[in-house]
Amino acid sequence: MKRVGVIGGGQLAWMMAGAAKKLGVELVVQTPSLDDPAVPISAKDNVFAPIHDANATDELAKRSDVITFENEFVDIEALSKLAQQGVCFRPKLEALAPLLDKYHQRCYLRDLGLPVPQFIAIEQEWNTTAEIICTSQFGFPAVLKARRHGYDGQGTFIIQEIEDLKQKLELQTTKRVGSQSNFLLEEFIPFERELAVIAARSVSGEVVTYSVVETQQEEQVCRRVIAPADISLDVTFEIENIAHTLLNSLEAVGVFGIELFLTGGGKVLVNEVAPRTHNSGHFSIDACETSQFEQHLRAVCSMQLGNTTMICPGTVMVNLLGYEISQNDYIIKRQQIEQIPQAHVHWYGKTESRPGRKLGHVTVLLDTQNRSVAMAIARNIEYIWYPNST
Ligand code: ADP
């Protein structure tokens, strides 16, 4: 495999560049805009089109040996026609299909016997089943999610009372979050920690996992990742088993990110699966023998998987999120953060900052697994980065 076509040209594709060079692979991306992060690092014959445009993917296929995804918001039905004509997708479309709709994904995980929060689908604008279930079974708060096209908390709402739920459903139905008005309603999990694991599966069926990490979200958006998570061996083992079961069942090829809840009672529940490289695995670029991006390319190019071991005892990754509308490149702040010992700043080169937009991240390698040390460093980075942080 010499040329990998990537559907999506955002930061996840951009972060494949170093690995592609190392492995002697060329990337060509399908992405809407010339300004997207991965455009400067990929081939000159990129395809400039929205990622759900299957005609554009047909074009991408002519320019590449295999096609992979940095973004899963694709038109599976249209892509299936290309697969029938012999286009090679990795992961294959059948491995993506059960995951793209949050309700279908939940059903798939439950049917596999994996632990998930209780959930129901709401098919219409409003229905009394939702009210009954929410009131009698889930209680409040409950969580309402748009079934498709949610990311970084867009389309996920914590609902405090029945009036809230009615209002949100009516509002979201009018706005049509995503391409349809269907929702998933689920119990609120009063988790003690949120965890995640990156797993990869090769063409020959080998599965490897990275260290389980702790992720910290604010307003449903990932702010920090601490690796490894401070959890028991039993919990680690259970999560590794979940990853193996899932990737084998999907016959996945490539890297998948799995987000989980850990309750106060030590129960693990799967929240969400992403069929691609994931924010919770960015620490692997600087802190592991093989980054998740190299691993993904290895898998989709039929190479042997690399070693996932960490090269330091611990690490903390902090997302640099936009907090204003601006074209500032924040060079002074970035330089200040780079002064922190063992800090590696990754800047995605986006042309515009907007509140909540992921502009970059920083990973700090630690000589300890002490969570308080990791948190203190994260606070320091955020103090430098955000204008009003204390
Ligand atoms: P997205 O696809 O936008 O990332 P998620 O479903 O992962 O949306 O939800 C984002 C965040 O919202 C989670 O990381 C978690 O903090 C919170 N959340 C989601 N579902 C629940 C739930 N059932 N109980 C408690 N918190 C939840």
Image (cartoon, helix red, strand yellow):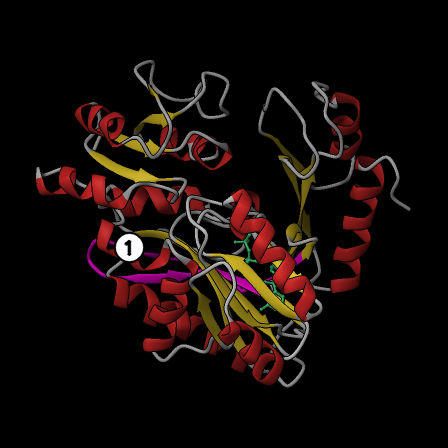
In terms of secondary structure, where does tag 1 sit?
A: helix
Q: Can residue 127 be spotted in the picture?
A: yes
Q: Residue at x 74, y 56 (%)?
A: 374
Image coordinates of residue 103 in percent, x first then y, are 41, 64
Q: Residue at x 57, y 28 (%)?
A: 348
Rendered-image quadrant of the N terminus: top left
331 in the magenta segment = no
Q: Which residues are magenta?
A: 195-216
Q: Main secondary structure of the magenta part?
A: strand
Residue found farthest to the left: 85
Q: Can residue 198 be spotted in the picture?
A: no
Q: Quadrant of residue 107?
A: bottom left
Residue found farthest to the top: 44
Displayed-image quarter of ligand 1: bottom right
Image coordinates of residue 119 in percent, x first then y, are 48, 73
Q: Quadrant of residue 60?
A: top left
201 in the magenta segment = yes
Q: What residue did someone put label 1 on?
A: 97
Q: Is residue 6 above or below residue 286?
A: above
Towards the viewer: 206 or 191: 191
